[in-house]
Image (cartoon, grey):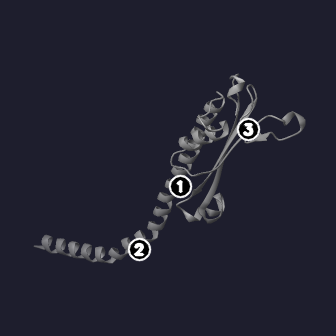
Amino acid sequence: MKKSHSMGKFYSRARRNSKRTRGEGLVEFAVVLPFFFLLMFGILDLGHLYFVQVTLENAIRQAGRYAVTGAHENGKSRVASIQDVATKAAMGLDITQCIVSSSSGTETGGVGNVNSAGLPGENVTISLTTHLTLFTPMTDHIYGTNSVGTFTESVTFRNELFPYGQRI
């Protein structure tokens, strides 16, 4: 009989201790939850940043491959055709600026011809700019104000020796 009586004391003591700790779990959860969400949204932001970087690099590569051939769509200039290729390749992004310039005029101290895709054998530079709104507002001081970051990719290619009559 003594054994069952002592076991009853043990279970009643365990029940009393569990009632005391019920509120502790709720407080710990309330303290940890904001950090958990910050971590999750931070991971989403990093994934989104990576997506923007890879998409811009792909778009600029596609536009450059198109530009060096000297090709253009019917009824459009080479620059407009290159900009169309870049915009289509940057699916999912809002390309706010697409600049195509050539190396013509750089030997005389100029900066090159903006809105010119260049002659055969000349360099053509393509630059794409987009804006990204971040999910986590605490990263404002890193990527800009109002959770908006500006991303620019730029690359220079040398035009192939395409027939000169294709240059527009």
* Residue 163 % position (x, y): 69, 22
Q: Residue 27 carries which label?
A: 2
Name the residue carrying label 3. 116
* Residue 57 % position (x, y): 60, 40
* Residue 162 % position (x, y): 68, 23
Q: Which of marks 2 and 1 is nearer the N terminus?
A: 2
Name the residue carrying label 1. 45
Q: Nearer the viewer, residue 151 or 128?
A: 128
* Amino acid type shown at disc 2: Val
* Proximity of marks 3 and 1: CB atoms separated by less than 8 Å: no
Q: For the residues carrying marks 3 and 1, which lies nearer the camera in this image?
A: 3
Give the structural element (helix, strand or loop) at label 2: helix
Please tell me in which quadrant of the rendered image residue 126 appears. top right
* Proximity of marks 3 and 2: CB atoms separated by less than 8 Å: no
* Residue 5 % position (x, y): 15, 75
Mark 3, Cα crowd under 10 Å, few <14 / some 14-19 / many 20+, is many
Mark 3 vs mark 2, CA separation in Å:
64 Å
* Amino acid type shown at disc 3: Ser
Placement of 93 over or under 105, stated as above or below: below
